[in-house]
Image: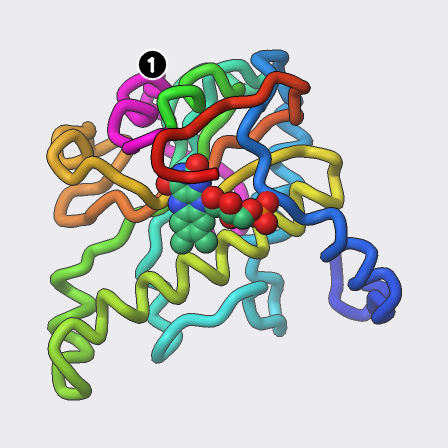
Amino acid sequence: MPVGTLVKMGLQELNALLATRRSTKSIAEAPVRAKELEDVLGAVFRVAPGRSRAYGSAHARYPVTATLIAGNVSGLASGSYRVAPSGNVHDVVPGEYRDIVARATIDGSWIAASPALLVLSADVGAENAEFNWQSDGRGERFIAMEVGLIAQTVSLATAALDLGTVLIAGIHADAARHLPESVVPRHEELIAVMPLGRASARTVNTSTER
Ligand SMILES: Cc1cc2nc3c(=O)[nH]c(=O)nc-3n(C[C@H](O)[C@H](O)[C@H](O)COP(=O)(O)O)c2cc1C
């Protein structure tokens, strides 16, 4: 959509959207539609001509890779998909990956039943090398900030579409290292996972988070 046709949101609408943002820790197994996920990913990752992205990045490097794990999505085969700067998904590797991704989190085993997962990863070594002139470990800090910006944008887009999500950043480093390249590209680390689906009434008790 050309930028000129976008309608700017007023403060009242923004406040209303922000008021609906919350972490959803009980997501129904029921399927979501591919179009719903497309809308979320488009809102967050799409780079329209002449427009900056929905989130910033130190030196505009955009080191965070987004991978969609589809498990119960009508109109999208189960598998892992990379999310392109168009917001579209590509490079599918068919299969069921939700369980191994869930097991790489500390208290997110329940997300294996979510219809889809958004996996966020980045090459921490490369970013540290890029920004070490500022300070040791600065690249890693910038990645964490960027993932925070992405996560808030995903949260708002899902809230606008009556979908639920939560940022799960408690990661088992060892389990994460064994994830296949189709889920976390080579040289990258798993930083966070966000389940995508419809909120269910069931309440999940997580061991480390409330
Ligand atoms: C950096 C960060 C890491 C988080 N990691 C986890 C996590 O590993 N597991 C989890 O269940 N929730 C996680 N959360 C979600 C928080 O538990 C949640 O944001 C908090 O309870 C406040 O609830 P609200 O988001 O509904 O306002 C994380 C949130 C943030 C910002």
Query: Dot 1: few (<14), some (14–19), or many (≥20) neighbours within 10 Å?
Result: few
- At which x and y percent is residue 196? 55, 31
Judging from the image, the colouring scheme is rainbow
- Callout 1, which amino acid? Gly
- At which x and y percent is residue 156? 66, 51
| Secondary structure state at the residue bearing disc 1 | loop
Is ligand 1 closer than 8 angstroms to the Cβ of mark 1?
no
Residue at image position (35%, 79%) is 59
Q: Quadrant of the N terminus?
A: bottom right
- At which x and y percent is residue 79? 39, 20
Q: Nearer the viewer, residue 150 or 48?
A: 150
- Please tell me whether residue 162 is drawn above or below residue 65 in the rendered image: above
Q: Describe residue 93's horizontal placement relative to residue 166 as left or right.
A: left
- Please tell me whether residue 12 is drawn above or below residue 112 in the rendered image: below
Residue at image position (72%, 57%) is 18
Q: Describe residue 197's horizontal placement relative to residue 111 as left or right.
A: right
Which contiguous range is marked in magenta? 83-107
Q: Is residue 88 magenta?
A: yes
Q: What residue sits right under mark 1 in the picture?
A: 95
Task: Give the quarter of the image for residue 107.
Answer: top left
